[in-house]
């Protein structure tokens, strides 16, 4: 069976920061679990778990599981400075119609 040659298919490119190997030796299990627990306790809102995230990334860098990088390059300061706005009210029983703005009901 022959397949048509598609010239629009591009070669995959490696990630910008290089590989991100798996932690087969479980060297960073404790900080990873602490981060995951924090996410679980905070409904997945990572801005409340930045210190745990930093510890996990530091562990990975210290154990050569990722390239060494200055913590300033991860954007933690931008997250701290960001204005947090409440999410709009969502009623799961109300249908959502794309393109229509919500009207206040009388």
Image (spheres, helix red, strand yellow):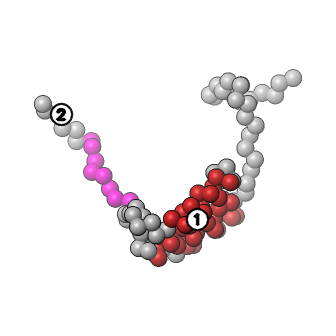
Q: Position of residue 46 (x, y in %)?
A: 63, 57
Judge from the rendering whether residue 60 lies leftward or rightward of residue 42; answer left or right: left
Q: Position of residue 105 (x, y in %)?
A: 83, 24
Is 96 in front, or is 57? 57
Quadrant of the drawing holding the C terminus: top right
Question: Is residue 74 on the magenta stretch?
Answer: no
Query: Would you call the spot at circle 2 few (<14 residues within 10 Å), some (14-19), or many (20 or more)?
Result: few
Task: Give the structural element (helix, strand or loop) at label 2.
Answer: loop
Instruction: Give the total number of marks visible in the rendering.
Output: 2
The residue that mark 1 highlights is: 53
- Label disc, if present, on residue 4 of the rendered structure: 2
What is the quadrant of residue 79 in the picture? bottom right
Q: Position of residue 6 (x, y in %)?
A: 22, 38
* Residue shown at the point (52%, 68%) measured from the top left: 57
Q: Which residues are magenta?
A: 8-17
Question: Is residue 11 on the magenta stretch?
Answer: yes
Task: Give the structural element (helix, strand or loop) at label 1.
Answer: helix
Judge from the rendering whether residue 102 lies leftward or rightward of residue 29; answer left or right: right
Mark 1 or mark 2: which is in front? 1
Q: Is residue 83 visible?
A: yes
* Residue shown at the point (73%, 30%) measured from the top left: 91
What is the quadrant of residue 93 in the picture? top right
* Residue shown at the point (56%, 67%) measured from the top left: 31
Q: Is residue 20 visible?
A: no
Q: Position of residue 87 (x, y in %)?
A: 73, 44
Is 35 in front, or is 84? 35
Is 75 in front, or is 39? 39
């Amino acid at each position: 069976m022959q397949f048509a040659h598609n010239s629009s298919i591009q070669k995959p490119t490696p990630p910008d920061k290089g590989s991100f190997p798996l932690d087969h030796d479980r060297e960073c299990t404790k900080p990873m679990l602490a981060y995951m627990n924090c996410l679980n306790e905070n409904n997945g809102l990572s801005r409340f778990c930045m210190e745990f995230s930093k510890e996990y990334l530091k562990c990975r860098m210290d154990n050569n599981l990722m390239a060494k990088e200055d913590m300033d390059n991860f954007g933690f300061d931008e997250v701290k400075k960001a204005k947090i706005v409440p999410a709009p009210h969502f009623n799961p029983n109300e249908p959502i119609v794309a393109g229509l703005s919500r009207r206040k009901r009388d």
